[in-house]
Amino acid sequence: MKLLLLGGNGQVGRELRRSLAPLGELAVATREGGAGDAAADFDAPESLAALVAGSAPDVVVNAAAYTAVDQAETDREAAFRVNAEAPAALARACAECGALLVHYSTDYVFDGNATRPYREDDPTAPLGVYGESKLAGEAAIRDSGARHAILRTAWVYAAHGRNFLRTMLRLAGERDALRVVADQVGAPTPASWIADATAAMLRRGIDGAGTWHVVADGETSWHGFASAIMREAVAAGLLARAPGVLPIGTADYPTPARRPAYSVLDTARLQRDFGLRPPGWETGLRATLRELASA
């Protein structure tokens, strides 16, 4: 299998380098290029077709995205260029060469008003520009005629990069108490498991086209996640002591972009189609902290 990975330096991209390598011949592209990686400029979507054609891949895995949720509110053109126009160009290129496109999307395509986990076919209603741009990317891929797998995920973190887990660990060393939103609910999901699930899906074979939710099992609030981070980080020897974690409401932490209050995604389709059982979010957290501790 020949694979082309785009966004190889991101949270999920770095894990995909590891998980995809055993599947065959893996080429990686990043924004900057270099060190054996090709350059992929998502601010110039029209340039991506040549990259795909030159690689002649069986599978293109797109882990690149514009993820600055708040900045997107005032930078709409850039968000849509990277999250919608670039995936559209990739999908057209994949349709031309017969490659499968694997693309990652987000819980932000939903409005967060549900009372049960979102299924893949539930109505979408983004609250802000970031979600709108990701939804537009999904639509462009579906309309392209390319074979594709759209994998929606949420609350992604890793032992590397910029994410909630690493921010909480940093602040724990600076403050005696942390104030964390307690009225937004989701499933914290390790980038490592997203990458492993992607590789497992490709190994099993993805026929035709579809959308699947790829998140950890269970649910918690950001406050619950932060509390668990402190508790498990102390147990792993990463923190000498845990600061207090105080619950606050979304209204107490205003941001330019609205966040979905409920971001839990249903993974029944993933389990049915690929036999993949997501780990509990606490299990994923402990594994990631062990990785940090060993490093």
Image (cartoon, rainbow, N blue to C red):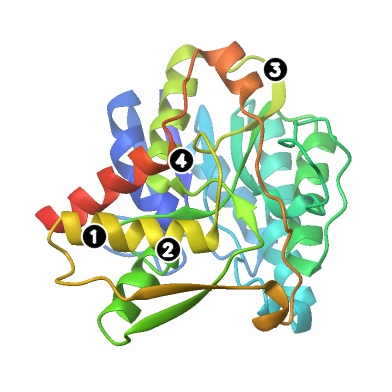
**Vertical relation: 123 (above or below) 274:** below
Image coordinates for residue 185, horizontal then vertical, percent:
63, 53
C-alpha span from label 2 to label 3 = 40 Å
Image coordinates for residue 252, horizontal then vertical, percent:
67, 82
Residue that carries the numbered disc 3 in the rendered image: 208
**Vertical relation: 186 (above or below) 123:** below
The answer, for residue 232, to whether it is visible in the render is yes
C-alpha span from label 3 to label 1 = 43 Å
Q: Earlier in the sequence, mark 1 or mark 4?
A: 4
Q: Earlier in the sequence, mark 2 or mark 4?
A: 4
Q: Quadrant of the C terminus?
A: bottom left
Which amino acid, by three-letter code, is at mark 4? Leu
**Left or right: 86 as drawn, with respect to 176:** right
Q: Earlier in the sequence, mark 3 or mark 4?
A: 4
Image coordinates for residue 147, horizontal then vertical, percent:
69, 26
How many neighbours does mark 1 have within 10 angstroms: few (below 14), some (14-19), or many (20 or more)?
Answer: many
**Secondary structure beneath label 4:** strand
Which amino acid, by three-letter code, is at mark 1? Ala
Residue that carries the numbered disc 2 in the rendered image: 226
C-alpha span from label 3 to label 4 = 19 Å
> Which numbered circle lies on residue 4?
4
